[in-house]
Image (tube, grey):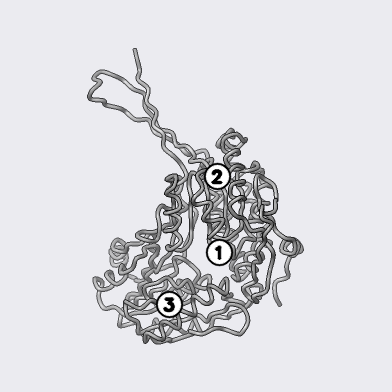
Amino acid sequence: MTVALEKSVQDFISTPRQLFIGGQWVDAASGRTFATPNPATGDTLAHIAEADREDVDRAVRAARAAFEEGPWSRMTASERGRVIWRIGDLIEQYGDELAQLESLDNGKPYAVARAADIPLAAELFRYMAGWATKIEGNTISLSVPYMPGSEFHAYTLREPIGVVAQIIPWNFPLLMAAWKLGPALTTGNTVILKPAEQTPLSALRLAEIMAEAGLPDGVVNVLPGYGETAGAALAAHDGVDKVAFTGSTEVGKLIVQAAAGNLKKVSLELGGKSPNVVFDDVDPALAIPGAANAIFFNHGQCCVAGSRLFVHESRFDEVVGGVADIARGIKLGSGLDPDTQMGPLVSDEQFRRVTGYLESGRAEGARTVAGGQRHGDKGYFVQPTVITDTTPDMSIVREEIFGPVVVASPFSSLDELAAQANDTAYGLGAGIWTRDVNKAHALAKRLRAGTVWINCYNVFDAALPFGGYKQSGWGREMGHEVLEAYTEVKAVCTQLHP
């Protein structure tokens, strides 16, 4: 029996959804709408107003007014923190509804959204609410050689950047909105949020929740639309002081180019091709399901997915065979089916991308151990797939697939392994499975990745910074490090005259 949709969810998707600008629900200036599909069926789920350049202008003006003239800039840090905390509480209160929207729009199992996406989003806002009263500067002792005997009182202030454009992806729609909005609001900025066109529903519902929490008009504006139009207009807009983007490395490079016009600040959380390393001394009962979870969680649609599995040659057949067995046993289906363990890919475009890589791997001589095919004849389902007999130059080894596809390779020595693991343009995440703590930490230091998990994978917490080396991005999400991405530092110097 499928999960019964709440009436509020049914009403939400049956009503054409508008843009949220200046605290008001408004149609797109062009009057255009677009359809968001249910990825389990391909059928239209809801109709959404399509933002374009004129709507971006309206939203930037609303955010600028809220930043410079509205009550947000006059609130105390404590008042601001209480509003942000209430957002977290309301996300938890409406958790069932939000999880259903995520499952419908993204395809992920309802149970996964309810257990992971919703509580993580709520906790992110609560964690960031606590930082609102703790954003501090420093006092500095000056020694100015060309002014001997002079005394100074010098200090720094950490201030909000201003109007921030945030462009988020479709793989964790609500959680990515929380990762972006939490620190921006805590530091006193105002925001224009553009959700992915594939998954706009939870961001639009979040706009209602933030208004209910008491967020003043114009502080957060939500513009669903396409990257080529609304996203590009936001990245290039001279009224935007910073753009924060999560998505593919290819689009991240376009964001950087667009932001050059007024040299706005940029932070990027981009793609990955993460190595997941299994040594010969592992407990297979821990490492095999861990390696499977690293790639098959969220249908493999994770920037940090452990998509390159390296196994010591003495345990290669055992571990790869175990991961393949898990892959064959995963139940695919609608996210609203309680028995579903893996839902569909998010869209027809993503389905064609992933299956294209599978065809490329076969054509280049790789061997499919499990999966490798479409599942069913309806929706965007791809079988969990394990591939071996690859070479380092194959596209399935070098490029981010963003689907439930892992390529497995044997290794014999630590030096060989470290070189292979780092042989990538990306550097987002990595996993290590071993009983040897010295070996684990020695390899962790050598891996060029922003997060290294040891004997675990996909562990996230609002206090744990997340981001990438190399072409996996600029800056960090979460933790206290993210506050630097949303603040400017001002130095103030006063000469003291006796």
Q: Position of residue 160 (x, y in %)?
A: 49, 39
Observer-nearest of 28 and 104:
28
Which numbered disc covers residue 170?
Answer: 1
Residue 85 visible in this rendered orientation of the protein: no
Residue appearing at x 42%, y 49% in the figure: 260
Instruction: Note whether residue 141 is visible.
Output: yes
Give the percent coordinates (x, y) of residue 318. Answer: 38, 84
Q: Earlier in the sequence, mark 1 or mark 3?
A: 1
Residue type, numbered disc 3: Val
In the depicted structure, whether residue 121 falls above or below residue 282: above
Of label 3 and label 2, which has the lower sequence position? 2
Q: Quadrant of the C terminus?
A: top left
**Residue 406: which disc?**
3
Tell me the crowding category of disc 2: few under 14, some 14 to 19, or many 20 or more residues within 10 angstroms, Cα based: many
Q: Residue at x 39, y 33 (%)?
A: 138
Between the residue at mark 3 and the residue at mark 2, the CA separation in whole angstroms equals 38 Å
Of callouts 2 and 1, the N-terminal one = 1
Q: Is residue 336 left or right of residue 279?
A: right
Dot 2 amino acid type: Leu
Q: Nearer the viewer, residue 57 or 247?
A: 57
Q: Amino acid at mark 1?
A: Trp
Residue underneath mark 2: 185
Would you say the residues marked 1 and 3 are in contact, meaning their CB atoms lie under 8 Å apart? no
Measured as percent of width and height from the top left, residue 223 is found at 61, 54
Using the numbered discs, state the Cα–Cα distance from disc 1 to disc 3 in whole angstroms: 21 Å
Look at 28% across and 19% down and name the residue there.
Answer: 150
In this picture, residue 462 sits left or right of residue 411: right
Sort mark 3 into few (<14), some (14-19) or many (20+) by Cα contacts within 10 Å.
many
